[in-house]
Image (spheres, grey):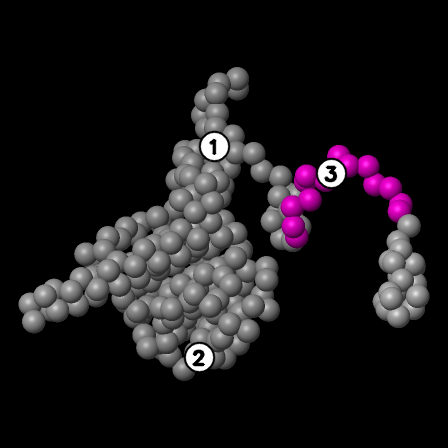
Amino acid sequence: MAGQSSSKLRRLKSSSWRQLRRRLFLLEKLRDARTIGIVVGTVGIKGHREAVTRLRMLCQTASKKAYAISVGKINVAKLSNFSEIDAFVLISCPFGVLLETNDYFKPVVSIFEAEMALNPTKSWAAEAGWSAEFGQILDDQIGEHEEDGRVEVSLVSGNIRVDGGKTAKSDEPDGTDKQIALYSAGDYFKERTWHGLDDSIRIDEELKVTEGRSGIAAGYATEAPSKNES
């Protein structure tokens, strides 16, 4: 019994750690997102308008585009129609929070997780707990992102992002060393283009027009005649 009990406890601990790592991964994806969709899962819950307003302010402070979306009860097919959205924040009652989002093509997080990712005044640790009730954070302060040129490296993509997505200001005179992040508008469309299989091996090969097969499927001209025909 003792062995079975300890084995069961280990499985539960492993599952909880797996869930925690998954939520932290979604937080990092939300920080990398440029366009965020605010999904209003229900309009019958108190404070949903205030929640939308607060999320818009969080996105504006973090220099991210935000769009409010109301599609009723959400599912994979509905959210898949918004290909321009990089991540979704779901406004719902505590029982409507999605914990299993592996089937969704884009990250779906709760308001509490959006606060942890976008509000610089918030810090979170596992022992601090996790809440699905957003009413208790609607009146919290929204801090300003620092403009000292501090950059972060994404733990997911490895790209460099400036804090808040803003261009850092500096009092240093011209000619001093500054941190520069290279960005091209074409990168956005490049990421949205599907290139298919890698054809780089045959790029340098000469393309020549060759004659194809002639005849019918029962017997092409290049094939030897069958015994019945002879």
Which residue occupies 73% across, 38% down? 203
Q: Position of residue 229 (x, y in %)?
A: 92, 68
Task: Give the residue number, with chain letter if any, for mark 2.
Answer: 43
Q: Nearer the viewer, residue 151 or 230?
A: 230
Q: Nearer the viewer, residue 197 or 123?
A: 197
Tell me: residue 198, above or below residue 80. Answer: above
- Tag nearer the camera, 2 or 3: 3
- Tag 2's secondary structure? loop
Q: Amino acid at mark 2?
A: Val
Which comes before the other along the chain, label 2 or label 3?
2
Extent of the magenta region: 196-210
Which comes before the other along the chain, label 1 or label 2?
2
Quadrant of residue 81 within the rendered picture: bottom right
Which comes before the other along the chain, label 1 or label 3?
1
Label at residue 146: none
In the rendered image, the quadrant that contains the C terminus is bottom right
Q: CA distance from mark 1 to mark 3?
A: 44 Å
Q: Amino acid at mark 1?
A: Lys
Taking the image as shown, residue 101 lies to the left or right of residue 185, namely left
Q: Amino acid at mark 3?
A: Ile
Q: Position of residue 177 (x, y in %)?
A: 48, 20
One can see residue 110 in this view: yes
Taking the image as shown, residue 120 lies to the left or right of residue 217, namely left
Task: Give the residue number, with chain letter if any, for mark 3.
Answer: 203
- Tag nearer the camera, 1 or 3: 3
The crowd level at tag 1 (other Cα within 10 Å; few <14, some 14-19, many 20+) is few
Asked if residue 153 lies in the magenta stretch, the reply is no
Q: CA distance from mark 2 to mark 3?
A: 55 Å
**Main SS, magenta residues:** loop
